Amino acid sequence: MQHQSLRIGLFGFGVVGEGLYKVLQQTPSLKAELTKVCIKHPEKKRNAPTQLFTTDKNNLLWDEAINVIVEVTDDADAAFEIVATALRNGKAVVSANKKMLAEHLPDLLQIQLETGSSLLYESAACASIPVIRNLEEYYDNDLLHAIKAIVNGSTNFILTKMFEEQLSFSEALLLAQQSGFAESNPVLDVEGYDAVNKWALLLNHAYGIVEHPNKILFTGIQSIHTADAQVAQEKKYEIKLVAQAKKLKEGNVAAFVLPQFTKSDEPLSFVKNEYNGVVIESGFADKQFFYGKGAGSFPTASAVLSDIAALRYQYKYEYKKLYHHQPHTLTHDFYLKVYLSFTDWHFIPKDDFEWIEEWHAGEERKYLVGVIHAQHLYNQNWWKANETSLILMPEPIIENVEIVKLKKRSLELAGVNL
Amino acid sequence: MQHQSLRIGLFGFGVVGEGLYKVLQQTPSLKAELTKVCIKHPEKKRNAPTQLFTTDKNNLLWDEAINVIVEVTDDADAAFEIVATALRNGKAVVSANKKMLAEHLPDLLQIQLETGSSLLYESAACASIPVIRNLEEYYDNDLLHAIKAIVNGSTNFILTKMFEEQLSFSEALLLAQQSGFAESNPVLDVEGYDAVNKWALLLNHAYGIVEHPNKILFTGIQSIHTADAQVAQEKKYEIKLVAQAKKLKEGNVAAFVLPQFTKSDEPLSFVKNEYNGVVIESGFADKQFFYGKGAGSFPTASAVLSDIAALRYQYKYEYKKLYHHQPHTLTHDFYLKVYLSFTDWHFIPKDDFEWIEEWHAGEERKYLVGVIHAQHLYNQNWWKANETSLILMPEPIIENVEIVKLKKRSLELAGVNL
């Protein structure tokens, strides 16, 4: 097989871009040459020859000598224009921009269909863990029962410190920022936006689901309280921000990103600090677990490099769950067993629960364990307000409505009214 | 990209072969058709149409309509002839036969060079864990510092039972056989032959090393004693059969398969029962961990299927560590810190140790911890005989000869003579 010689136009020369520049210089065997770099701030000092740089994107996008565009900027809107134009101009594209990719996925799929150009983005989800390629290549649609993952390193770092060093949320966040694992504006990470963007992308490669991130039930770890960490430790659980998806009946898939109690012998409990982890349950390969660094300049550059290497043999995602199979449908029609901690019953619409099977009033906070419909959580926001903290119980999904009705009725008949 | 339509000739219709037949029927999207199956025993009842089967290998190897040969037999010698002929006849080949692949690797590399045909064998090492493809695609030679793995599920199952249920080696082996995780003749697994075959293959994809398995220092778990498990538990270690490789100076690589004490917070300690695990340490992606089922019909069929899927876009291993980089050299020129348990000092050539830093005499057994040259272990067999059990200490490799000399001298000066 003849390898294509790659001539790369790079957008962005931050830590990832510069890292990539260095690696490409060290790996002549790749036959990939960095032809031009487009930057926003020409006044900044760069560790590369001046003639490499331009501020005009068209110098890259319309240069016929460039056949690959690598986009590692942090501007989602500008990035979409760049990527779309590049694909339409017959160039292959590698992007690390999860927000742009997740929000513009339908358009990007359409452009790929029309142009036949390849768009790769392994670095956009779990960086150094090759999860997208593996979902594309190793799992047939019918066999993928479930996928669970820790996809955000900042929040996992904060949760680890809350557990292992009994820090409060704000102390742990400060430590994460000092250690370089959280942005100075941490909202995107802490409140789950980054995780749900990645999850929207992975749902496509896992199940052929194409949905905007705002259609997915999610929150972050902003409400998790030291008291919740204590409850978890009493119950021998850890708390993780878990992105998960599970195949239900008739082509439906339950998918959400929520904090969860995880048992200590589960693979995801092994994932500490800034690491990411992915657990895939399939009919054939059984349970698989991938673990590695999910962010940072080097892990990201490493994933970008692997995409570039794949372009040498004209690799492209087939999106086979979407195009070659019956794609699945995202649903909120199932029940979740949740732990909820709060300061006052006043804030909790008790009637919205199918049943409440445990409750506890402590000095500082109260908590309950109950079952609630996922659509209700998606529609309402009370559980994100008033210092209320929601954490999924282990094995949280109850699909069978009849079982829920029966259990509810039997509790009513027994006169149980917690 | 146009997909190649695959017409498959299958050798072997045991559990893996039959599993593959079923999956191919269920995945028409693969555009892979099973054309003919070559079997040894036509008298056996098969769950497939009679006209599919033949006992004449030439009906597959010389049929121009067949463009892919899948080889999942258990006969290493016959398999080599089949695979070599198929490649020479311009067919792509998928094989799961680690013994054949490891022992004939130089020939198979040569034939691939001459014919340009693709030979894939993801299922031959760690089955459901896509380690070969990831080593090929995700790690640049210069960046791969070390790789450690549990590549044999049978021995890991036995060790887990020795630890968690305090079974003796023979009790644990019996349980493994009853559970289907060990062959009725378990020597290949238990004594490390299976592991070292896989390791010879992976050393090629990791470092471009092409060596016969018998050039690699290895043993299995046949000598591990319940007393060793007790020592491990006192020291808060587990015992695992670890295949490992580490880059030393000047293009040398230390590589071996030996039992090792692993610390409880290491990823490999997480690998229990019949599972496999691979830890890759690289400059860019940092530490990565892959975990999954390493054997069994379904995980193996799943890996074979992923190879077949890759053939649709003419994928072949590039062996880039071998051909595009300066390949590394396997060396035994380094020191190992080992734990050795035994029944009588008489069996231990104390002078062969650089130094002995700890020893203990218990009721049943004695043990020591000392430093010994790896070449000595490779050349000699006393440590595999007379109920002597060798287990590597954590971080066992000492590369620097000067440090060893200095430490030895200082111990002599101090009059320490354990």
Image (tube, coloured by chain):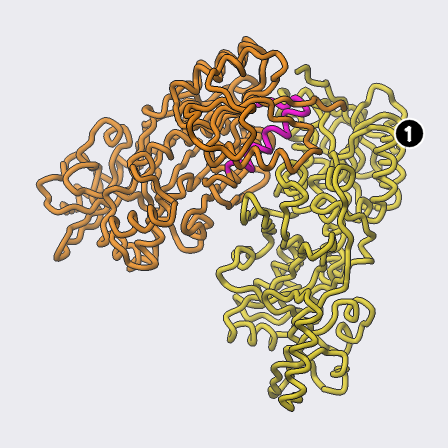
Chain colours: A orange, B yellow
Q: Is residue A219 visible?
A: no
Q: Amino acid at mark 1?
A: Asn
On the image, the x and y values in percent for residue A67 come to 61, 17
On the image, the x and y values in percent for residue A317 come to 57, 23
- Confirm whether the magenta stretch covers residue A337: no
The residue to which callout 1 is attached is B58
Mark 1, other Cα within 10 Å: few <14 / some 14–19 / many ≥20: few
A280 with respect to B117 (left or right): left
B199 with respect to A199 (left or right): right
Q: Quadrant of residue B196?
A: bottom right
Note whether A35 is above or below A352 in the view shown.
above
What is the chief secondary structure element of the magenta stretch? helix
Residue nearest the viewer, comparing B186 with A306 = A306
Note whether A139 is above or below A238 in the view shown.
above
Residue nearest the viewer, comparing B41 with A327 = A327
Note whether A405 is above or below A213 in the view shown.
below
Instruction: Find the residue positioned furthest to the left.
Output: A346
Instruction: Find the residue positioned furthest to the bottom.
Output: B415
Note whether A211 is above or below A146 in the view shown.
above
Q: Quadrant of residue B68?
A: top right
Q: Which quarter of the image is occupied by the N terminus of chain A? A: top right
Tag 1 subunit: B
Residue nearest the viewer, comparing B220 with A15 = A15
For the point 58% across and 68% down, the residue is B162
For the point 72% across and 18% down, the residue is B5
For the point 47% across and 37% down, the residue is A126
Image: magenta residue range: A300-319
A348 with respect to B231 (left or right): left
